[in-house]
Image (cartoon, rainbow, N blue to C red):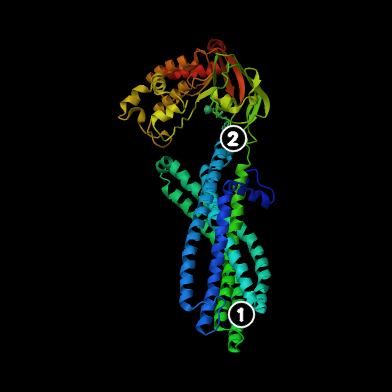
Amino acid sequence: MDEKEQLKPKLSKESLSEALSIFKFVAPYKWRLIVGLFLLFISSVVFLSFFTIFKWMINTADGAENPLGFSLPQFGMLMVGILIFQGVVSYLRVILFAYASEKSTADLRKALYSKIISLPIYFFETNKSGELVSRLTSDIDRVYSTFSITLAEIIRQLIILVGSVMLLYITSPKLTFIMLATFPVVVVVALFFGKYIRGLSKQRQKVIADTNSLLSESIQTIRAVKTFTNEIFERDKYKASNDKIVDVAMNFAKFRALFTVFIVTILFGALCYIIWQSAMMVQTNKIESGDLLAFISYTALIGGAIASLGNFYADLISTLGATERIREVLDMESEVDLSKADSPTFNRFQGNIEFNKISFTYPSRPDVQVLKEINLKIQSGQKVALVGTSGAGKSTIMQLLLRFYDYQKGNILVDGKPIEDYPISEYRGNMAIVPQEVILLGDTIYNNILYGKPNARKEEIIEAAKQSNSWEFISSFPDGLETLIGERGVKLSGGQRQRIAIARAILRNPSILLLDEATSALDAESEKVVQEALNNLMKDRTSIIIAHRLATVKDVDCIYVLENGKIIEQGTHLELSAKENGAYHHLAKLQFEMAE
Ligand SMILES: Nc1ncnc2c1ncn2[C@@H]1O[C@H](COP(=O)(O)OP(=O)(O)OP(=O)(O)O)[C@@H](O)[C@H]1O
Ligand SMILES: [Mg+2]
């Protein structure tokens, strides 16, 4: 798959307003933010006023008048007072901003999680989990730091900039104009660099995400890494990926460095000129030495403000990139509406299933047709089996029935109604599957069984464990049901995992039961016992069974034989066995001979 195609659909031309819509997450906390901004304004103005006080103090020491008529000790008292006030204001401001940014980022994270978890399977096939997690966490971090620091700093620096310019203007309009003349140059250059910085920052986030996905992938498949002694191979892969990060990051750094050098040179040049001019003014007694100090301070403040605004501008730009990616995900269409998926009292299906001429290709592999005009008709309460060679499309049929994918042609009816017409939660709530590859939660056995029916009582869980023939091994563990089974269930054997999955299905009590090689990992004896449990479970409900071992499906109502995505034979075991040249006959004969 093309990596650039991931996280579709792409946002159209970087539409700023779209990216800014991320701010709706701040809206609920806007009053705190507004008060915080007001306090920020006050503390910035107070900060500026210090330099005027310095000016007055030095002029007073030189024997000149000051507008307040204060003596030096009085100035000392004034400054202590202002410092205390400043402290209180800053404290409140930081707390208010922190509250707004923490809360809104948490809301954003929750919204994103809800979205991701309700996206269709297809999304997860085209996006690697490690990369997705890395992207979203680092993108959210970016947004968070913007909400919590960058925005406040930008506003503070803007206030300082405007204030300093005004105060400078009062003392010397001419020098102020020199200072201001550098502005347009800086802005034009900032826009120019901004474009590159934005692209490079996106690129950097992407290679970091790739690297993280390598890390999480090899941890997830650590057993494979070790059995194939591929540690060195994996290390080199990771190394190469890291080197790429450095390359891209250095490119990024070079642009930032150039940008900084440029700004500093322009600004520092202006600064030097202004100080030189004002030194001459002191010499000719046009201004007091306190005024000189004020000049230098305000000019330095202006320079500092512009330089840091440049930096924050770059930050802001890369945040826009991050919000675009977050929006891309938030704007995707979910298959489940989490806001109203809370009603467990859905209608129970009777369990009539009909596939009419279903043709299907996986969206991630559009050129391979996996199912070709499949017709199935299953009456309520019937059991049917799908058999056939590996890769024939058996599991795919179950996935379509579970609505994991949209098929291209034909239709599937359940109880006479197209399956798309049911609300998805109600629809899937009527089904249970024991999948080919059981994946369990890294939690206790108890919680894993509970997953089949989150409101089940403990007795029901024990009953399900007994029926699935798991109770024996569960009670042999010292912690019983509370035994932790490791990430994805690695601390259980394959057969034990399968029995836990069966217990889940039993607990769920579905109207349609799907068994995909549900007993393949069991030894003959356990299989017999579990098969009995499954037979009980299948009683009076529609069941579809996939099996390679034909002995397990001998008694079903109808067997469909698949080959290359087509149904090539159908009938009962007896009917199909009787067909001398039939595929089923051939399969049965092979298995029969092997058993002998
Ligand atoms: N998620 C997927 N994306 C793309 N192709 C897939 C996907 N899952 C399966 N396929 C392809 O679809 C075909 C049918 O796969 P399916 O899993 O339905 O086979 P199966 O009959 O269940 O085989 P087995 O008996 O080995 O489990 C295979 O060729 C497989 O490569
Ligand atoms: Mg399969």
The residue nearer to you, when weighing 442 against 569, is 442
* Location of residue 415 (image quadrant): top right
- Labels 2 & 1 near each other (Cβ < 8 A): no
Residue drawn at x 45%, y 17% as measured from the top left:
534
* Location of residue 364 (image quadrant): top right
The residue nearer to you, when weighing 243 against 122, is 122
Q: Which amino acid type corresponds to the residue marked 2 in the rendered image?
A: Pro
Residue 392 visible from this viewpoint: no
Residue 274: which disc? 1
Which quarter of the image is occupied by the C terminus?
top left
Q: Quick one: SS at disc 1?
A: helix
Residue 407 visible from this viewpoint: yes
Where's ligand 1: which quadrant?
top right
Residue drawn at x 60%, y 57% as measured from the top left:
316
Establish if 193 lies above or below 495: below
* Residue at the far left in the pictured view: 478
Lateral position of residue 11 relative to residue 538, left or right: right
Lateral position of residue 396 relative to residue 76, left or right: right
**Which residue is disc 2 drawn over?**
120
Lateral position of residue 492 relative to residue 31, left or right: left
| Residue 321, x across and y down, in percent | 61, 53
- The nearer-to-camera label among 2 and 1 is 1
Disc 1: CA contacts within 10 A as few (<14), some (14-19) or many (>=20): many
| Residue 241, x across and y down, in percent | 51, 53
The residue nearer to you, when weighing 162 against 391, is 162
